[in-house]
Amino acid sequence: MSSFSTRLRSWTQDLLLRRVVRNSSSLFIGQVVAAVMNIVTANLLGAGQFGALGILTGFVTDINRLLSFRMSEAVVRYFGEALERGDKRRAGAVVKAAALAESGASLLAFGVLALLAPLAARFLTRDVALAPLYLLYGVTILAHLVTETATGVLQVTGHFRSQGVINLVQSLLVAGLLVGIALSGGGLLEILMAYLIGKAILGIGPLAVALYWLPRTLGADWWRAPLSLLPDWRGMVRFAFSTNVSGTINLVARDSEVPFVGFFFGNEIAGYYKVALAVIQLIIMPINPFISTTYPELTRAYTARQWERLRSLLRRVTLIAAAWTGAVVVGLLLLGKQVLFGDWLIFGRVFNVYDASYLPAFPILLVLLIGYGVANILFWNRSLLLAQGQTSFALWVSFIAMVAKVAACFLILPAAGYLAQAGLLSAYFIVTVGLMTWRGLAGLRRAEQVQ
């Protein structure tokens, strides 16, 4: 048997890899439909209103994430650890504590949004009449009252397919609503309502599924577990706090690009930037579900000290991500402009994804592709550090890079132009992902040597 056949068989027989791929594929389908909806919305609204929509929805999401403790990661860490040890009572206490903390943070986030909505309308979308729409879309915060906790439960218990079904159902529903809006000539308000419905389903759906499976996993009285059973509650608080700070850093440094661009350059440029980011999402879409599905597997393998399984998983998911990313980069360089914005001849007809008026988004896309390509290939960098408990290193690297990026924004923008914003984001990815990957692999080597 050839070495290639042997290697191929080892890949197909790798149960850990197969579980990750299977779980990831169930989340992928809904993301495809969501990407198509984004394209329809962009072409329906035009760059100016599409930018305003992106700024508005982005700001509400940012407020929610700012006050979120990313409970899914804490649940994966402590709920998963308790289940691995067979301590169901302690696992129930973890879920209960996470849900209480997250719901309190969500209510606080909605209150903060109510205070800041008028300022956001004036300085970001530059239209005070849009302030009520910020509050309207803010209902999504209440719909996601304990969604992070529920998502963590579903990740640990392996119910990724349920998440995929929820994503698909809401995507198809919103897609149908958008088609109706397009046919009836609706505008920004109607589209915002459609997205609000979809976000509400994404918030309530995981909670309903988690509440169905928790009694079957922990017992009917799981919610009665006293909080005194929490495993090192101080450590859990520190972990949650550090992931919140880390999430805030990511929020400021990389996930608030559209509001940032709107502040410096206005709604139209924000629309171009949002289109570029939407295309980037298409590129990272097949790999993105791997992040949530790989993290629990890395944590399990590291806790069980199964070093060879862990290294094999890292090698193989990296090769998968590199192969996909490389193919997409080559395709975009050769055909991207024609495929996305027109002049691509298929069966005698000119085909394009976005309206040609969005052509200024293409240079933004090429610059962003550098940083996102690196992050896409090494997507597991932070998950490996979290599995090792090295949250402080990830925190400091991200924090220092964030401060440098934000300072550079205010120093050189808007004089340097909107491509500079894309360049700063790519540089942020290259620096942070590179350092975290190096530290995670070094920690893995040390752990192997100790054993």
Image (cartoon, grey):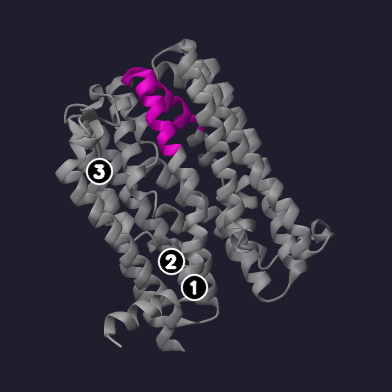
In this rendered view, identify the residue nearer to me: 237 or 14: 14
Residue 227: where, in percent of width, then height?
76, 60
Query: Which secondary structure type mostly characterizes the magenta part of the structure?
Result: helix
In the image, residue 234 lies in the stretch drawn in magenta: no
Cα–Cα span, label 2 and label 1: 19 Å
Q: Is residue 223 left or right of residue 40?
A: right
Nearer the camera: disc 1 or disc 3: 1
Classify mark 3: residues with Cα within 10 Å, few (<14), some (14-19) or many (20+).
Answer: many
Find residue 384 and report its horizontal and vertical position in percent: 43, 67
**Residue, disc 2:** 385
Q: Is residue 125 left or right of residue 102?
A: left
Residue lying at 45% horizontally and 78% vertically, measured from the top left: 13
Q: Secondary structure at mark 2?
A: helix
Residue type at mark 2 is: Leu
Q: Is residue 37 magenta?
A: yes
Magenta region: 34-60
User: Which image quadrant for residue 197?
Assistant: top right
Q: Which quadrant of the structure image shows residue 41?
A: top left
Foreground tag (2 vs 3): 3
Residue 432 appears in the picture as rendered: no
At x 42% / y 52%, what residue is drawn? Answer: 288
The amino acid type found where label 1 is placed reads: Leu
Q: Residues within 10 Å of mark 1 (few under 14, many from 20)?
A: some
Residue 31 % position (x, y) = 46, 44
Instruction: Decide which of 330, 438 is in the foreground and name it.
Output: 330
Give above or below for 281 relative to 380: above
- Sequence-wise first label, 2 or 1: 1
Q: Which mark is residue 16?
A: 1
Q: Is residue 78 above or below residue 25?
A: below
Q: Could you tell whether 124 is left or right of 26 in the image?
A: left
In the image, which disc is placed on residue 368?
3
